[in-house]
Amino acid sequence: MPSGSADFFTTRLDNLVAWARKNSLWPLPFGTACCAIEYMSIVSSHYDLARFGAEVVRFSPRQADLLIVAGTVVDKLAPVLRKIYDQMPEPKWVISMGVCASSGGFYRAYHVVQGIDEIVPVDVYVPGCPPTPEELMYGILSLQESIQSGRKSRDDRSARYAATLPALPSP
Amino acid sequence: MSDVAISPVSAPAERVRARLSGAIPDSRVSVADLDLPTIETDPRSWPAVARFLRDDPEMRFDLLIDLLGVDNLRRRGRPSRFELVVHLFSTSRDEHVRVKVILDGENPELPSVVDVWPAANWFEREAFDLFGFRFSGHPNLRRILCHQAFVGHALRKDYPPGQRWMCTEEDLYVPGLVARENVEEDHFETVVVNLGPSHPATHGTLRIVARLDGEQIVEAESEIGYLHRCFEKMSETHTWNQVIPYTDRLNYCSAFINNVAYCKTVERMLGIEVPERGALVRTILSEFSRIMDHCVCIGANLVDTGALTNFWYLFQPREEIYGLIEACCGARLTVSYGRVGGLSREVPADFVARCRSLLRSIPKFLDDVDNLVKRNRIVWDRFRGVGVVTRDQAIGWGFAGPCLRASGVGYDVRKARPYDFYDRFDWDVPVHRDGDNFARYLVRMEEMRQSLSIIRQALEILPSSGPVSSGDWHVVLPPKDRVYHDMESLIYHFKWVMEGIQVPEGERYEWFEGANGELGFYVVSTGGGSPYRIKPRPACFPMMAAFEKIIVGSRVSDAIATLGTLNIIAGELDR
Ligand code: SF4
């Protein structure tokens, strides 16, 4: 090991951790509707998500670090989704699979959440109705890239969610 | 109310009229001859009419198909604002009948018929939730699809489609059995377990709360509505053809069947025919969809019981059928391939070859699964004698499709009222007597084989060329090259897109065989570019309602296996 400052060493450890995290995502499929059926395809034999180290599907939030919301989330389900998100340990990421989860899709209706970013922060939006397995795979790969680059999971792209957070105490 | 006599009066309507006027000589009850014999009554006579229809030896309408509300606020010629529409079926005579209960006032009240048809329970709750009808005597009248904090009744015509209400954790429903003290048990304490709404075994978004004594379920309650995405309201705010993508998402495991069922209903309202080739392609793809649906049902069910391998075996044919469907229309799951009047586009050139190759490959997968399962000791223990539904229970609870046939009732719409070319094919309806999980498994496996045989025969008579859609341009979009070159086609195109097809005023109930049972569409048109009311008949809705009764006395693990064999699809259940 070359001699180096502590800084130099820490950066490498971060990279190492990011690399490990990237390749061992444990997804929790929060599958509600049609998109969940496509999700089944992506983990089964033909598409085989295992190739990207993200196939250890966990149905317990406490054992997962990637929440894949596949399908429409309606108002009745919203508190449930929030609770599951809260129960996941940090660091955690969220992929919104399909237009319903991303924006309500074509259900502009009295009982449908108009995008899950009303409730939880989202890292990757995968459009499509349902997205093809290839599209979802691309979404997962982009998330892996962003994990590798060290980007924080709870990023601020979800403006509507950020607006609901209490203001940070000024330093 | 006066009789609306349309001559010549059809024989079934005449028979109902003759019997009814003999049994209930009441001026408030009348019979009209619409697409179905339609009895109109008022809330006071309704229980008597209901009993008559179920018990009279010449009626015997023992199966409640559907019960729904209609708001006539923007509809002309109806005597009151609200009415309750009930569709009934007689398993002994293969006949349908419709009852309309004309309700008074803005917040109508009427007697419940849960004691006549147990299946009415959830349907009445739904009518309460979405229309605000109060059913006196109902055992548990509370919202079913919308959440508890919802205000108003969403399917009333004056309810804005986009008006939402916040639901917080406090608003989630807590079943009464959770809070109740359990006094009878002196030996063990009972425990309440909650499964779902997000639980791998509930396949989506159902919730079951059960009280256990040791491993045994002593009491259970299921809660649904976690995927209520307002199909019916959405369909009222779109044109007739724009509704098609929404129908895909009802039973999304076999989307194409929903497409076709909806389109056929509208076609019958319009009185147009689909060319033979189009109809046969529809049949072929519907049967492939049925196979896919059964594959998901059985595969997922076996996963729940620990037999993971079958899942991989059954998903492979599914993937291959997806390939065929994708080649036809570009989508895999939610196809939107049907159109009113035919199909959205021509099938690919190698359609027949692809179908034939599927016909060759699929049986192998089915045999593999059968070999793994049929004589497997574990599967026997988990499936045989578990989740038993007797014939009478199945009828009373409003079962349909494979689950009904597994309980000994051989009702299949494709045989009872053949549409398209089903009467020209040689095929059987598998029926089983045991009514348990294993029977449901066997019926589904056999149905897949029958579907393959139907497809084989359909391919034989499929014309090699010819249109797949009707040539009526009031209904079907003219071909693009003509739109670019002649004025008339351009005008048709413009009208089709801007105003939608025009469906004449009227109402209709049409029923077809969906993958998990009778799939019906009740459609009301006031003559315009969009539907006034559409109510799909969700096959799994009454089955889910019965689920909490089926599982009492069984173990939790058996309940999970049973849930899988009922094939509950949340999209269709909650709409
Ligand atoms: S995005 Fe489309 S496929 Fe996915 S849940 Fe919504 S409607 Fe279904």
Image (tube, rainbow, N blue to C red):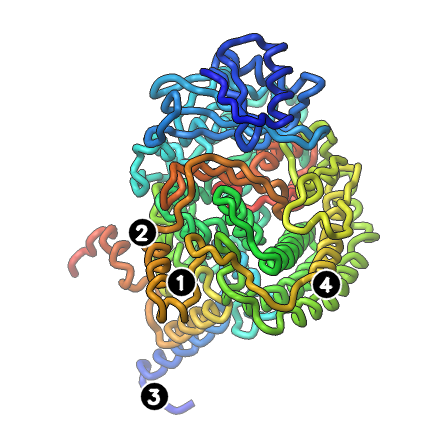
Q: Chain of mark 2?
A: A
Residue A115, located in which quarter of the rendered image?
bottom left
- In whole angstroms, how far apart are the C-alphas of marks 2 and 1? 16 Å
Quick check: marks 2 and 1 in contact, CB under 8 Å?
no
Residue at which label 3 appears: A4
Residue wearing tag 4: B460
| Chain to which mark 1 belongs | A
Q: Mark 1 vs mark 3: which is more N-terminal?
A: 3
For the residue labelled by badge 2, is the local secondary structure a helix, a strand or a loop?
helix
Q: Residue at x 61, y 60 (%)?
A: B277
Q: Nearer the viewer, mark 3 or mark 2?
A: 2
Residue that mark 2 sits on: A118
- Secondary structure beneath disc 3? loop
Whether labels 2 and 1 belong to a single chain: the reply is yes
Q: Nearer the viewer, mark 4 or mark 1?
A: 4
Q: Position of residue B37 (x, y in %)?
A: 57, 26
* Disc 1 residue type (three-letter): Trp
Q: Position of residue B374 (x, y in %)?
A: 81, 52
CB of mark 3 within 8 Å of CB of mark 2?
A: no
Chain holding disc 4: B
Q: Earlier in the sequence, mark 2 or mark 1?
A: 1
Sooner in the amino-acid sequence: mark 3 or mark 2? 3
